[in-house]
Image (cartoon, coloured by chain):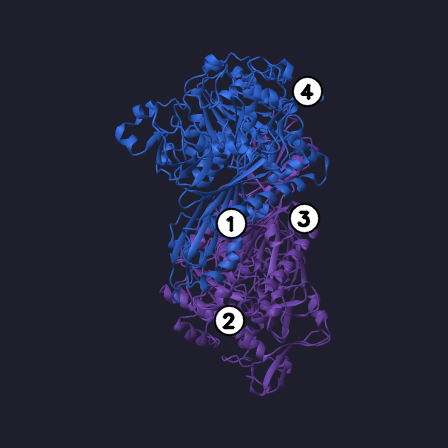
Chain colours: A purple, B blue
Amino acid sequence: MSRNWRNVKRQEFKIVFEPTGRQVYALPGTILLEAAALAGVIVQTPCGGAGTCGKCRVRVVSGSCPPTSACKAALGEPEIASGWRLACQAKVLSDLVVEVPDRSLFEAQQQILVRDEGAGVVLQPAVGKHYVELGIPGSMDSRSDVDRIHRAIHPFTFKRAGLHLLRTLPGALRRQAFAGTAVVVDNVMIDFEPGNTAAQCYGVAFDIGTTTLVGTLVNLATGADLAVEARINPQTSYGDDVISRIRKCREEPKGLAQLQRVILGAMNDIVDALIQRAAVSRESVYEVTLAGNTTMQQIVCGIDPSALGELPFSPVFTDALSLTASELSLDIHPNGRVFVFPQIGGFVGGDTVAGIVASRLDREADPVLLVDIGTNGEIAHKGKLIATSVAAGPAFEGARISCGMRATAGAIEKVMIEADVRVNVIGNARPAGLCGSGLIDVVSELLRVGVLDATGRILAPGELPASAPAAVRKRLVERDGHTDLMLAGKAETASGEPLYITQRDVRELQLASAAIRSGINILLAMEGLRPSEVGGVLLAGGFGNFIRRNHARRIGLLPPIAGRKIRFIGNASSLGAKRALLSVAEKKYASEIARVVRHVDLSLSPEFQMEFGAAMMFPECDLGAGMDAGSLNQGSGGCG
Amino acid sequence: MSRNWRNVKRQEFKIVFEPTGRQVYALPGTILLEAAALAGVIVQTPCGGAGTCGKCRVRVVSGSCPPTSACKAALGEPEIASGWRLACQAKVLSDLVVEVPDRSLFEAQQQILVRDEGAGVVLQPAVGKHYVELGIPGSMDSRSDVDRIHRAIHPFTFKRAGLHLLRTLPGALRRQAFAGTAVVVDNVMIDFEPGNTAAQCYGVAFDIGTTTLVGTLVNLATGADLAVEARINPQTSYGDDVISRIRKCREEPKGLAQLQRVILGAMNDIVDALIQRAAVSRESVYEVTLAGNTTMQQIVCGIDPSALGELPFSPVFTDALSLTASELSLDIHPNGRVFVFPQIGGFVGGDTVAGIVASRLDREADPVLLVDIGTNGEIAHKGKLIATSVAAGPAFEGARISCGMRATAGAIEKVMIEADVRVNVIGNARPAGLCGSGLIDVVSELLRVGVLDATGRILAPGELPASAPAAVRKRLVERDGHTDLMLAGKAETASGEPLYITQRDVRELQLASAAIRSGINILLAMEGLRPSEVGGVLLAGGFGNFIRRNHARRIGLLPPIAGRKIRFIGNASSLGAKRALLSVAEKKYASEIARVVRHVDLSLSPEFQMEFGAAMMFPECDLGAGMDAGSLNQGSGGCG
């Protein structure tokens, strides 16, 4: 950085997104779509951000944001005058307040739910609440307590009452003078609450990643998100990939119990934080949905994943599980339910199913890839609906990287190299580390300016091309026979220690990226497709909000596919889990998906090792021809 | 007794019933049908024992048993020569071995089950066992463990695997080299056992009475009974009727928990005894069915019955419950299931439903009464399918009677008065007490010989009619202003203490009998029926094996209905519970019955008190005209 940190910070603008009120700081020139994604607000872009479909319209309520010609063409004068802009075109040039209408959101994020079976979710949760006033029964009315309630509400609303409720119901019914709110989950009445509590009806959707756990608190009466919380999966202290967790279960008699205990502890922490932030009571959280890879799902349920550690890598179950919260010691309503996503096979589990549910991959017209980038990368393909998983390692989630961190406040999430290195930090804070998207950026930018060669080696100062910026050259440090690059000096960081990207960090990214890329290549080969024939790539993950598409291609993570075909869909697994919470039809859809998707095991594929080796090399910088004007990349230039 | 006990004992003959091997000692002249009933073998008598239908045929394998003319008419010469007799006609005149073919059994007792939907049960238990050899999976076969098993057996056999099994399945599958027996209960796979254990498949049917608990161990692979065990309900130490149990739950904070604990303890004792006697393993008992009145069922499940102690006498649930054995701490297979019968309303619960299921009451052509005699008497009527319950008290089960006992070894179960009092004792033992059927006998016989008057007073020796046998006169003892009768002297009894029937005992029987009778009278009045218009009475109960029909009428327990119309159907509640164990269709039938039967609450009926008062008087001894040749009463004579 040629300017000191304070200078950089002053250049950022604050953008507030309504109606959620989420806010983010962005550099001048950032496209609104990207700023929104940084805030976790995923705007839909069916045209890939080309500015042609008009689906991404948002309204600038305050601040200056001049319309582009594409905005004017798509929206017309009266709308422009009212502040409407295309999020994929308009740029941040001041502090802004931006209203994102529900219809412009990526569909799985839409909050107000439509009532038809089209794109949206019909709000039809497994949880129902029904207020009834039964009246004091007459002296000849010797019907049962359950029968009384059953006849007062829709006869098909529930089939039976749970044993725990039967044990408290007679007392509750009489204390409440035969009035109250029946709580029904999955056709089972689980509570009868005093008063009319029908509006207090919540659930938590969990994305259970190998490295990261994300919980979303959802209002099941309205479909609205209330809060999101994430935690590092505490199992990472026993090893940062699924294989290390499986090994622990295989080798230690209490390994499984230990791993289960810590992950359930973290999930309960997330529940605690969610209900506190949204100020809802624990007893009004009635359902949890849970999507993770096969290893994670099995460990959460206390089901031994050992067989995933040997050929033929078998999960124990395939169909969705319906459990009680008490069976898992999850601290929600004591009679609450847990839905565990169905699994496909091998390591391809509920997270991939949830991702397909969120993205509607199977309903795409063209051959489309869904690439979910996490510690375990999952890749699904629309063609014959096949899916595979690759061990990417946790680099994209900030682990195994010397200054890596999760995409939270203080994480460098974006890096640009101009005259010097410029960074964007989440939460308007001093930098504390580097998250996945920042890592991809820095490697991509170093490639572009010639500081990295195609093998991934950081060149020594003496080897640099003449075109390399002088300020970048000064950041290079030679140590133990290799070169590292200083991202931020000790005066700029939160800790007072400088942040480096090291040669080893680049190698970690190469491994992670090569794993994903070789998986993509093999699926395409199996379908007989060249990259140019791919209709689209849905890029999903909770790794760092937003991967710049050009950068993803430049480092070889994605094949040379036109930028307009690449759509970022956010944390698809988390969104799928939320959909299941919102509708029983989505659960059924998940079960159908799990049955039809075929699992492809790459571990036995001789092609995989070859592809992996080839993908370890960065592509030559001749991909510019594949790039296009719709690119979201702010720092593009040179070979991008 | 004019002869001493040893003389009486020598006069009895041993009858062995095949194929069960059950044996009993009976006095000379006892009809085979009755001897069989004493052994718990209920032979069907559609004609009411008139000797005309020929359905009760049995084969005398050894011993002397001359055919009667009715036998010859119904069976023909070749069959008579092969030893076939009508059980309702042939008499015990020597030790016998008698073969009872399955088709001659009361249908609910039939062991080999027919395959059509007619009278019998189609063997279709909720428990299924399926041996599979899956073979070691190939290296590319990454299906889930559950999926592997699912595809190897019929696809509709189970819908899911229980969480407990999922936690042990992967280890079991691999230890067993991918072969074993899948155990499925109610569409849920609950175990995967080593080897082929399909033949080891058991269940226990429980009749949960206020006073008596009966458990039957059933082979679910064949439908055969393996063992029966009964215990006094240990809750009787807290009061001998349902009201005292309900009061305990209402008044003591831990009352319900205490009552639940002791009854579950006794049920587990029964399970222990059953599996020991039949030499089967606890882990191969997979299901329990449970039928009792509403109070008993709720207490067993830990569901507060307090609302049954106040108007309008509401049970908590109506529909059947499907629970896990572990929820009730029942010591069968740890993942086993419990089916709790559906309930009707008020005090009319699962036992009445089970009784209707066993008797097919709703399918009778004529108006038929089902009278289940227990501490709570339940009466159901075919007409509009109505049912009520009356508090009979435990006298029929031997409680509240000075020398009362359950119908087990040592119980006087039959009493005849000829020159002196003659008794029949269960189990060829010295008498230790008097069970329900013996109590009815002795009161009926004392009425007949004029020792009891119509108000139920035992006359003093000086008041006796001249016809009273001199030996009986000598047994009367005047004490505290009333008269008691010595049934057995101290030299004859097991304990060395004499056994009396006291004036108070007679009063207890009057109360019990009047409760049942007034209930019958009101149901008939509601249906607009005179006793002569009743097509039949199905007499059920676990009270003492066999009530002599003439005696039941003579003491006024039953209205004056021709003896041929009265059929003893054994412990119908227990048989219904067994049917539910044998077939899911029977469970469904039970649910349908519970929905259509209407509960009649007599507690608020002004007629009930009047009827009850009237029924306290014994009928005048002019009922002889209503009696008929088909009577089973061995001691009949005089006014019978």
Q: Position of residue B78 (x, y in %)?
A: 26, 31
Which numbered disc, 4 or 2, marks the residue closer to the eye?
4
> Chain letter of disc 3?
A
Residue that label 1 marks = B276
> Chain letter of disc 1?
B
What is the CA distance from the residue labelled 3 to the residue labelled 4? Answer: 69 Å
Residue in the picture at 39% in, 56% down: B132
Residue that label 3 marks = A282
Marks 3 and 4 share the same chain: no
Residue that label 2 marks = A513
Marks 1 and 2 share the same chain: no
Q: Amino acid at mark 1?
A: Gln
Check disc 4 and report its element: helix, strand or loop. strand
What is the CA distance from the residue labelled 1 to the residue labelled 2? Answer: 64 Å
Please tell me which residue lies in front, B422 or A173.
B422
Q: In which quadrant of the rendered image does the N terminus of chain B lie?
A: top right
Which numbered disc, 1 or 4, marks the residue closer to the eye?
4
Question: Of label 1 and label 4, which has the lower sequence position?
Answer: 1
Does residue A105 appear in this view?
A: no
Check disc 3 and report its element: helix, strand or loop. helix
Q: Amino acid at mark 3?
A: Arg
